[in-house]
Amino acid sequence: MKNKLDKSFGPVGSFAGIIVFFAGIGSLYFSWFSLILVLIGAFMGFTYSSTEIDFERKRVRFLNNLFGIIKVGVWMNVKPDMKIGITKSRKIWKTYSRGNRELDITNEDYRLVLYNSSGKKIMPIKKVDNLNSAKMDLETICRQLEIKSK
């Protein structure tokens, strides 16, 4: 099971990266130097974080998907004394307009988080929009991994 979490550079950085990417592609005909723009834009625009859950082998891994395709992460075995809980996440991305006005982009969601036996957060497992969906997914994932909820 694959779960996309967040864009690594936020919504503003990701949008700027996509603009730089297409500007680099548009100017490739004129200069080979624009290949650098394509690489930087692709990295900023398409890099995101995610998690993978392997229910058969009872393991999870947190991934950074570089350029949107290169997966970087290490598998971690889920032990029977681990737990999964629900936390509310609120991220605020700030940017400034040309008129020096502050623009805030707020993302609120619920995260299913894996905890170790002593109750310390290990990693987020899934991002869900509302609490009811989070509770249903928590029950399903706990049952499939054969661990308890927090």
Image (cartoon, rainbow, N blue to C red):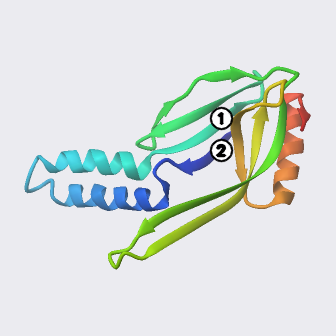
Residue 62 in picture, x, y percent from top left: 61, 33
Q: Amino acid at mark 2?
A: Asn
- 3D distance between C-alphas at marks 1 and 2: 6 Å
Question: Residue placed at 16% from the left, 51% from the top?
Answer: 34
Question: Residue placed at 84% from the left, 25% from the top?
Answer: 118
The image quarter containing residue 79 is top right
For label 1, the residue is 52
Viewer-proximal residue among 99 and 31: 99
Position of the N terminus, as image quadrant, is top right
Q: Is residue 120 left or right of residue 144?
A: left
Q: Give the number of callouts.
A: 2
Residue 135 in picture, x, y percent from top left: 87, 51
Q: Residue furthest bottom?
A: 99
In the rendered structure, are the residues bearing label 1 and label 2 in contact, judged by CB atoms less than 8 Å apart?
Answer: yes
For label 2, the residue is 3
Q: Residue furthest left?
A: 30
Residue 74 in picture, x, y percent from top left: 58, 23
Q: Is residue 24 left or right of residue 106?
A: left
